[in-house]
Image (cartoon, grey):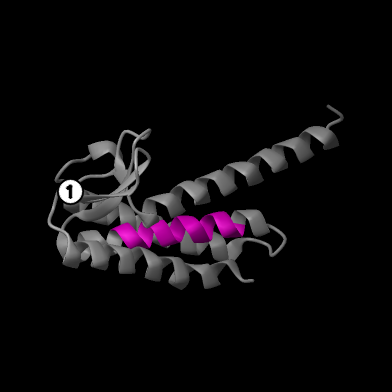
Amino acid sequence: MNPMALVPLILLVDQGLKFYVKTHFRPGWSVELIPGVIDLTYLRNPGAAFGLFHHRTELLILMGVLAVTLIFIYYRRLPPEKYILRYGLAFGLTGALGNLLDRLFYGYVIDMFNLSFWPGVFNVADVAIIVGIALIVIELWQDAEAVGEEAGE
């Protein structure tokens, strides 16, 4: 499967859940999904992760546009055999687009997943970004191991 085929699918899930929460919940309203583990909570996040850059919407939009542009440019230059990196970039792109759309349309990001063991509320786009980063780290780690093996380490 082409990694970029995942982008519209994950983006649809992200935006669909955000639309549902925005139209069925009031800000701050929460519903327990799994008792003691996860709640569905509607929060409007005017910043980035953990409240960084609070109410710096223009800066966050600029950073989102830059991230999307750089991912597209880099992705197109990758050889096909770099499939883990391609998937990582596709997930990262999806997350960046999902949160960028929120900022463009609403001026804030809609967050909804509240885990009892996690310090913040997040959304599908945030999960896509984390999965993307994890895949990129795996690819870099594998490349570093291969270089080490070639050097006889």
In the displayed structure, 116 sits above or below 30; it is above
Q: Residue furthest front?
A: 35
Side of 22 where 84 appears, left or right: right
Mark 1 Cα shell of 10 Å, populated few (<14), some (14-19), many (≥20):
many
Q: Pinpoint residue 81: horizontal percent, then vertical percent.
A: 72, 60
Q: Quadrant of residue 104?
A: bottom left
Q: Pinpoint residue 121: horizontal percent, then vertical percent.
A: 29, 44
Q: Pinpoint residue 10: horizontal percent, then vertical percent.
A: 44, 66
Q: Residue furthest right?
A: 152
Q: Quadrant of the C terminus?
A: top right
Residue at position x 25%, y 67% from top?
A: 20
State the predominant SS element of the stretch in magenta.
Answer: helix
Residue at position x 27%, y 63% from top?
A: 18
In the displayed structure, 97 sits above or below 57; it is below
Side of 45 where 128 appears, left or right: right
Amino acid under disc 1: Pro
Q: Residue furthest top?
A: 153
Can residue 129 be seen from the camera position used here? Answer: yes
| Residue span colored magenta | 86-99
- Magenta segment includes 91: yes
Residue marked by disc 1: 46
Residue at position x 78%, y 40% from top?
A: 146
Q: Pinpoint residue 58: horizontal percent, then vertical percent.
A: 18, 53
Q: Quadrant of the N terminus?
A: bottom right
